[in-house]
Image (tube, grey):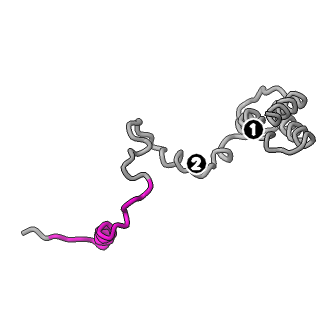
Amino acid sequence: MVTWYESAIDRSIREAQEQGEFDNLPGTGRPLSDHGREYDEDWWVKDWLQREGATTGVLPPTLALRREVEDLPAAVDRLRSEDAVRTRVAEVNERIRKARVGLLDGPPVLLPPCDPDEVVRGWRERRAS
């Protein structure tokens, strides 16, 4: 004797499908973003960090500083005055100094200080074009 049982959850899903509530969802008909990749047991953590933009808070300060130095041209491009650019470079250079003497947590950093004149020159050139 075969009996059929439908749980409340299954019934809700079936009714929603019948009403078309799952039609035209974003991503319908496209493959999953990680299709074909090797399984990573921390996939959900990495996905959450990327989705929430929380990667900067997870990095040790010295590694975050490296990223900040790499992104410095884009960051100063949002500033409006040369004084603001020089102030930003001075702040970054102070954090570089602290990292070099071991006052910041994380792996050792041997970043050279940023040249304020060079950063300002690049800022001017990008603003002119």
State the image coordinates of residue 92 (x, y, percent, origin top left).
83, 37
Residue range (magenta): 4-26
Circle 2 crowding by C-alpha within 10 Å: few under 14, some 14–19, many from 20? some
Label 1 packing within 10 angstroms: few (<14), some (14-19), many (20+): few
In the rendering, at what x and y percent does residue 96 appear? 82, 33
- Answer with left or right where residue 68 lies relative to residue 4: right
Residue 110 to residue 3: above or below: above
Q: Which quarter of the image is occupied by the N terminus?
A: bottom left
Q: Which residue is mark 2?
A: 49
Mark 2 to mark 1: distance in Å?
Answer: 22 Å
Q: Which mark is residue 74?
A: 1
- The image position of residue 89, as x and y in percent, is 86, 37
x 30%, y 73%: residue? 8
Q: In the image, is residue 122 above or below residue 40?
A: above
Q: Is residue 63 left or right of residue 111?
A: left
Earlier-in-chain disc, 2 versus 1:
2
Which residue is more in the foreground, 108 or 67?
A: 67
Q: Residue 91: x, y in percent? A: 87, 40
The reply to whether residue 95 is visible in this rendering is: yes
- Give the residue type at disc 2: Leu
Determine the residue positioned at 39% across, 53% down.
28
In this view, the residue farthest toward the right is: 83
In this view, the residue in front, 107 or 22, is 22
Residue nearer the viewer, 122 or 35: 122
- Residue type pointed to by label 1: Ala
